[in-house]
Image: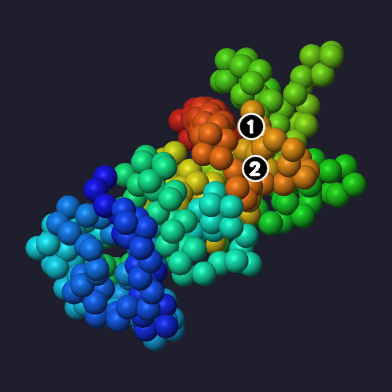
Amino acid sequence: MTNLFTLDVGQGKFHAYDSGNDIFYGKLPEENLINLNIPGLKKGDSIVIECAHVRESHRYTLAQPFNFSQLTQLKENADEKGITIRLFPQKSTPKTRKLAGVEASDKTDEVDTKSIASFLIKDRSAFYALKEFSPTRLTDYQDKNDSIFNYIQQCNGDLNPGKTSGYGFDKKIPYDDAVSRWIKKFALKLTEYLNGDIELIEAIGLKFDKKGNLKIAVPNRIYTLVHSILRPNGELRVRPDLGLVPNWKYIKAHYLGCKPYHMKQGVAASNYKHWMRRAVSEYAYPDKSSANATDFQVGMSYEELALLKEARTKVDKMTQTIWYAIRKMIVEDGLR
């Protein structure tokens, strides 16, 4: 990585942080961004800007101040001057502030640009994972995201009745659907598909008692994963844009919400990221206030962050193995 500049945009101005020289430039004219007239910027340098600020503008928000022609000019200027522009997911900015030891109440434009720069310099893999900037028309962006939004909305609508009724496993609430019936019928069979791996079996919320009987110990885990393939009405869950059962990459990103450039993800993502993954993970931040508190803490070290990411990756891979087993049972082997 050559010199890194991190930018923020707001109120008709933009702000730039030159990380190599530790200089913050506040309230620069927006046209200077399009022309890349930024003090100290040289050929080979990199610019990182929150992705929301370089989408085509529309009348309902001030977060996207540039029209498509301006964005195209920005890209052409960057190519001509040998500057790489990468996009930072704005939803991750609060995490960079936490790593910098900054509370949300102390947020400023300077804090944000410096926090993002510090994070990307210390975590090079995160820098190289950022998308490169390419001008996109608003209609193209909306078309791409509308089907995902509709998919998430359908999943939320399907999942909420089960969630509020104990997923069909609360004896006090009379409820069942195709998902809970599948679990009751095929949970034991699923353990065979998982080759009797106790770590995977318990990760999905199943448990053998002392007599060898299988119990649904944590219903929301297995229900959430089965629900990604089978709808409560008994139909297969398919992608709205293709009409096909999704692959794991799609499920991980849009159903479980494990992606940096995310919008509101909904019930399934909450069930997974805030309950299943955190509970199954081998990592817990030292001396956190409660077991249910996030492991991502203000001022945590990058060593602790690496341990957290490693543990999360392990849970994600376990979940992938479980999901493929469920998919094979329902889709390929027709166990419904």
**Label 1, residues with CA under 10 Å away: few <14, some 14-19, many ≥20:** some
Picture quarter containing residue 76?
bottom left
Query: Nearest the camera: 245 or 271?
Result: 271
Query: Nearest the camera: 103 or 264?
Result: 103
Quarter of the image containing the C terminus?
top right
Q: Is residue 78 left or right of residue 122?
A: left
Q: Which mark is residue 261?
A: none
Asked if residue 105 shows in the view, the reply is yes
Q: Is residue 209 left or right of residue 104?
A: right
At 39% from the left edge and 48% from the top edge, which residue is drawn? Answer: 120
Q: Which mark is residue 295?
A: 2
At 62% from the left edge and 15% from the top edge, which residue is drawn? Answer: 196
Q: Position of residue 41 (x, y in %)?
A: 22, 62
Q: Secondary structure at mark 2?
A: loop
**Residue type, label 2:** Asp
Q: Position of residue 66 (x, y in %)?
A: 29, 78
**Label 2, residues with CA under 10 Å away: few <14, some 14-19, many ≥20:** some
Between marks 1 and 2, how big is the CA–CA gap? Answer: 8 Å
**Residue type, label 1:** Tyr
At 32% from the left edge and 56% from the top edge, which residue is drawn? Answer: 21
Quarter of the image containing the N terminus?
top left
Picture quarter containing residue 142?
bottom left
Q: Secondary structure at mark 1?
A: loop
Asked if residue 238 shows in the view, the reply is no
Q: Is residue 315 above or below residue 238?
A: above
At 43% from the left edge and 46% from the top edge, which residue is drawn? Answer: 250
Residue annotated with mark 1: 283
Asked whether disc 1 touches disc 2, contact meaning CB atoms under 8 Å apart, the reply is yes
